[in-house]
Image (cartoon, grey):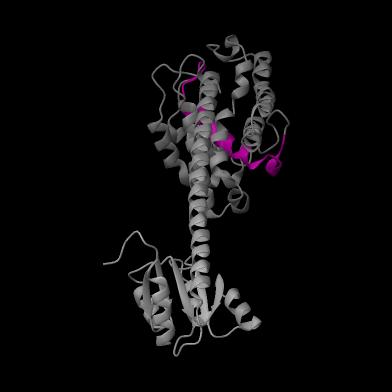
Amino acid sequence: MRDEKRQKIILVDDCHVSLTMGKSILEKHYDVYALHSAEKLFDILRKVTPDLILLDIEMPGMNGYDAITILKGNKRHEDIPVIFVTAKSSESDEYAGLTLGAIDYVTKPFSALLLLKRIENHLLIQRQRVELLGFNNNLIDMVMNKTRQVCGLQSAIITVVADLVEFRDVATGCHISRTQKYIERLIEQLMLEGVYMDELLSWDMDIKLPSTKLHDVGKISISDAILNKPGKLTPDEFEIMKTHVQKGVEAIGKMEGFGNFTEFLDHAKTFAGTHHEKWDGSGYPNGLEGENIPLEGRIMAIADVYDALISVRPYKDAYSTEEAARIIMEGSGVHFDPKLVDAFEKASDEFAAVAKEYRDEPNQSRRM
């Protein structure tokens, strides 16, 4: 019966004398599997994973070079250390074996002391390699877990900030949830149709989508008297309301000094700074026109306006999802990117489903 605690070595040699001698040297220290051919090696590898293989080069049928090539091409066996054993001792032979993936080269007839010491050294290196790999994997897991915790905390803080801005004293966050879901559905439809595909494929959605939560963060600078006014704003009040865009960009810019979230905050600034621009150039704050408006802003414009239409505001009742969809489609080429409106039309039922799933509490209202 083999000792499960002892390391396992497979010795492959077609020479009966060498096989017997090698087994005699090794079996006091290791569990040894002595085989007469490379074909037998692959048979036993189906059942046994050795710690090291001693492989003869010159054998009938499959030689050692062929065998190691197959071994190193198999993910299950590629990390098993292989030492070539042979009567050959030329530099070119050693070079050929090492090039194919062998870790060492031992000549026959064996020197018991040298063979054991070389095997001991290589098994130690292999054990240390496995331990180091395990340590690295554990370290990677620890870093990933810590990163997830940091990202989770970041997301929670951002959500709370966005909730405070959008709802002040009503902590539901439905507008934020809805607009992010609308954007997800619209992007999925665009990718399905291959529209703006190159740009969309360049986006890291795990960073891009959460950054939409800060699109209206500038409203924190707008007084309650204007933000929650129970009626239509005067022209002067509307001009003040419009400043929330630049205020939002400035607020996000200040966050850049408190952490390494540059990419996330860059996306957030783009959403915040461009979602009130209009396709025909009549939007604000910069009067950008057509594709000069970043794609993020053009997408957010549809999500934001749609949500404003289906929501109760201090100055209006909610529109039905059908009526909101009609208004979005009528805005094609004027307020909105026509390509995006075409995709929206196909995804409008999904927008309506999101609106239903994330509907506001009764009596809740916000100003767009």
Task: Pick the residue in front: 7 or 153.
Answer: 7
Q: Is residue 320 left or right of residue 275?
A: left
Q: Position of residue 217 (x, y in %)?
A: 60, 24
Residue 264 magenta-highlighted: no
Q: Position of residue 57 (x, y in %)?
A: 51, 83
- Residue extending farthest to the bottom is 60
Residue 15 appears in the figure: yes
Residue sitting at 39 percent across and 81 percent down?
Answer: 20
Q: Position of residue 10 (x, y in %)?
A: 41, 73
Residue stretch rendered in magenta on the structure: 288-316
Residue 326 appears in the figure: no
- Quadrant (top left, top right, bottom left, bottom right) of the N terminus: bottom left
Q: Position of residue 324 (x, y in %)?
A: 48, 33
Q: Is residue 37 above or below residue 184?
A: below
Residue 306 magenta-highlighted: yes
Residue sitting at 48 percent across and 57 percent down?
Answer: 127
Task: Pick the residue in front: 82 or 218.
Answer: 82
Q: Quadrant of residue 227?
A: top right
Magenta-highlighted stretch: main secondary structure? helix
- Quadrant (top left, top right, bottom left, bottom right) of the C terminus: top right
Task: Pick the residue in front: 158 or 225.
Answer: 158
Q: Is residue 207 above or below residue 60?
A: above
Residue sitting at 38 percent across and 32 percent down?
Answer: 357
